[in-house]
Image (cartoon, rainbow, N blue to C red):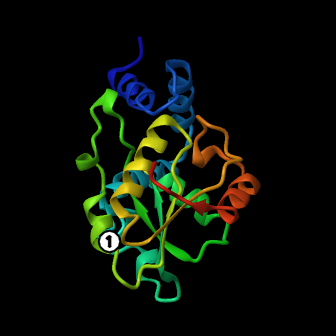
């Protein structure tokens, strides 16, 4: 019904999570109304995401080989907060309370979907554990997958370092990056030593 170029734009926008065809159509018409400069800035922003890479140390998003957090010598590198995704990292970082570093797993163990430990960013976490490492904080989603991953990491690392886990207050089945900052802050402050069962 639309010219192929415009139809293609709608279809590409529809690929974004949570964007239905009607929303994609509205976005496309909105983009159509932008000035040439606005359209060029938008196209450049989309094009520039190809320059992003994963930090070689922690797996966070970075424009360089090592992200700004890992490169920051003022942070406490003896404390590693393990998260499932970059979004979780930024949810914690936005609290402006945690001063350690992070490790991004890029998912959680999910046997039903075929996601096994060797498919996550776990080997590089093991390499980061040194005699100087004082604590590994498991800040994983309170879901079955997050709990399975926490149990696996606890068994893997508990003889090498103190393992703690966020306190509950975050509802089971919830997502860390959707948790309000007050609840997340309290869960972080009240973290407990994790034990393998």
Q: Is any atom of residue 65 visible in this view?
A: no
x and y percentages locating residue 109 in the rendered image: 36, 41
- State whether residue 66 is above or below residue 22: below
Query: In the image, what residue occupies the spot 40% across and 63% down?
Result: 60
Q: Residue at x 27, y 41 (%)?
A: 116
Does residue 111 appear to the left or right of 33 in the view shown? left
State the quadrant of the N terminus.
top left
Find the residue positioned furthest to the front.
197
- Judged from the image, the secondary structure of the residue bearing numbered disc 1 is loop
| Residue 57 relative to residue 104: left or right | left
Q: Is residue 63 left or right of residue 36?
A: left
Q: Residue at x 55, y 43 (%)?
A: 34
Instruction: State whether residue 127 appears in this view.
Output: yes
Q: Does residue 79 lie above or below 58 as drawn? A: below
* Circle 1 residue: 57
The location of residue 36, given as percent across then percent down, is 48, 49
Question: Could you say which quadrant of the image residue 128 lies in?
Answer: bottom left
Q: Residue furthest top?
A: 1
């Amino acid at each position: 019904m639309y010219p192929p170029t415009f139809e293609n734009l709608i279809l590409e926008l529809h690929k974004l999570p949570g964007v239905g065809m009607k929303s994609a159509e509205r976005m496309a018409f909105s983009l159509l109304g932008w000035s040439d400069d606005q359209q060029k800035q938008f196209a450049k922003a989309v094009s520039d995401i190809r320059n992003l890479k994963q930090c070689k140390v922690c797996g966070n998003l970075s424009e360089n080989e090592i992200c700004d957090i890992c490169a920051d010598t003022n942070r406490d590198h003896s404390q590693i907060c393990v998260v499932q995704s970059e979004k979780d990292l930024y949810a914690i970082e936005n609290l402006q309370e945690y001063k350690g570093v992070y490790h991004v797993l890029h998912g959680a163990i999910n046997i039903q979907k075929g996601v096994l430990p060797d498919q996550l960013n776990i080997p590089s976490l093991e390499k980061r554990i040194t005699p100087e490492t004082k604590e590994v904080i498991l800040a994983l989603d309170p879901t079955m997958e997050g709990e399975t991953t926490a149990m696996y990491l606890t068994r893997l690392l508990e003889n090498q370092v103190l393992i703690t886990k966020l306190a509950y207050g975050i509802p089971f089945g919830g997502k860390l990056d959707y948790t309000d900052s007050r609840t997340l802050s309290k869960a972080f402050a009240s973290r407990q030593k994790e034990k393998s069962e």
